[in-house]
Each structure stands twice: as C-alpha cells, then as structure tokens.
Image (cartoon, rainbow, N blue to C red):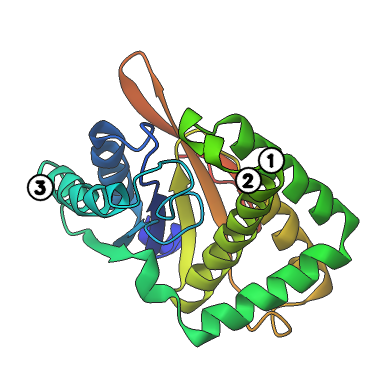
Amino acid sequence: MIGRFGKNAMTVVSMDSQAFDRDYLISTIAMCAKIHARLHIVLADDLYCYNRPVFDDDPNEIYKLVRDRFRYVENAIQRSEKGKLEVLVQSWRQFCTPEFIDILRRVYMLIVSEHTLVAAVRERTDHFIKRSRPGISHLTKDDLIARSRAYVVEETAMSLHLASSQNITDEYYPGDHAPILHLIYNIIDKDQLYEKLSLKSHEKRFWNIEQSNGRFRRTIEWSNGPGRMDI
C-alpha cells in the first residue's frame, strides 16, 4: 500500500481553527499509518493570519497559542494507533529558509502573470476576510485585504516548498480543496515550470478528511498522479 501512495504525507495544522481538533488528528494519523511511512504535522505558527496581531488585539496571545498547540498535537499522537508510522511535529518557522523566500518570490511572479491565479487568490482572500473575527476592527479594510492576500500566497508557496523539499506526495486537511494549489499544479505540470520555481517534479495528492455519523473518512480532492486513488 505504501508503495502506491508514497512514503511521506503532511497536514499543516491551523493555530486557531476548531476543525483541527484532537479527533481529526487521531483519525488522520490512523489513516496515514495504513498507507504511508511518515507523517509531517506542521504547525502554521508564523503566518500573517495566525501569529501576527491580526485577529487579536493582544500580541502576547499568539505565544500562548503556539505553546498550547504543541501540547495539543503531542497528546493526539500519544492517543493514536500509529503502528510503524513516523510522526514528525514541526514548526512552519523552521522551514522559512532562503530557499523558501526564493520560491515565495517565484510563486508570486507566477500568480500575477496568470489571470486564473489572480482571480483564485482574490476569491480565497475574500473567503478569509469573511471568516475573520471581531478582533480585527483596528485594521482598515485595505490592510485586512493586503494581509490576507499575503497569507494566501505565502501558504501556497510553503505547500509547494514542503512538497518538493520533503518529498511529500499527500496532504490531508478537513473540508478544504486548495483551489489555488490545484491551479498552480495544473500550470506547472502542463508547462514544466518546476525548474523555474526551484522545485523538484513530484506527484501530489490532496485529501479531504470529513466527519460523518461520528466517523472520519478520507476522499481524494485532486491528484496530478496517475491511476485511481480509491481506498
């Protein structure tokens, strides 16, 4: 099974979304244990919308959240049936290398040169603004749009960077289909832009974890790899 799906999987855990609760993590770890050798759990602790004082007036609150989140994830791992699965808990911040900054710049240049990507970023930005909490009232609308747009581009670039540098083929998230990533992979697969983006050519599968009747199930959202992914 592992050979079919690739060894490495990843989920980037939101620092504030309730969708990434302990049950989600326990179920995702158990699912990955059946078809992967390694799961990267990356804490999104250095993003515009998560650890900067955008959603909360108290900047100290972000540090409490980071510490609590590490304990939260570790507790989920201890309660999981992971078998031989290697689970790595890592910080987004540790991947913010000069190589990533270069990829971020290149992804930004790709986005602004493609009308479909510009529209997708705009739509995604609106999505995050609608989800924003009352604590953002100290920001102007233009500031909120600018920070949310920067977050969307940064998140997209980091996913590409991690997939390439860590040989990650499968990403797992609750209720999200990553439309911008899907568009970008279609473009770089079609036009062979991996080298221009400083990326290694790689297969990518995006999974949606949903809860129904008290049970979690996994469905494939999209894939740039060959063959069916039914499991």
Confirm whether residue 102 shows in the render.
yes
Mark 1 nearby-residue class (10 Å; few <14, some 14–19, many ≥20): few
Q: Secondary structure at mark 1?
A: helix
Viewer-closest of 33 and 166: 166
Which quadrant, please, contains the C terminus? Answer: top left
Mark 3 nearby-residue class (10 Å; few <14, some 14–19, many ≥20): few
Q: Look at 78% across and 73% down and name the residue there.
A: 109
Q: Which residue is mark 2?
A: 144
Q: Is residue 79 above or below residue 133?
A: below
Q: Which residue is mark 1?
A: 141
Instruction: Of the two numbered discs 3 and 2 on the same chain, state the one appearing first in sequence.
Output: 3
Mark 2 nearby-residue class (10 Å; few <14, some 14–19, many ≥20): many
Residue 155 rendering spot, x and y as whole percentages: 55, 58
Q: CA distance from mark 3 to mark 2?
A: 38 Å
In-image side of 202 versus 182 (left or right): left
- Total numbered circles: 3
Q: Secondary structure at mark 3?
A: helix
Q: Look at 53% across and 78% down and name the residue there.
A: 100
Instruction: Of the two numbered discs 1 and 3 on the same chain, state the one appearing first in sequence.
Output: 3
In-image side of 183 versus 128 (left or right): right
Type of residue at label 1? Lys
- Quadrant in which residue 87 is drawn: bottom left
Looking at the image, do the residues carrying marks 1 and 3 touch, with CB atoms under 8 Å apart?
A: no
Residue 41 rendering spot, x and y as whole percentages: 32, 57
Which quadrant, please, contains the N terminus? Answer: bottom left
Type of residue at label 3? Gln
- Quadrant in which residue 21 is drawn: top left
- Comparing marks 3 and 2, which lies closer to the viewer? 2
Q: Look at 37% across and 60% down and name the residue there.
A: 2
For this orientation, the residue located farthest to the front is 138
Q: Which residue is mark 3?
A: 78
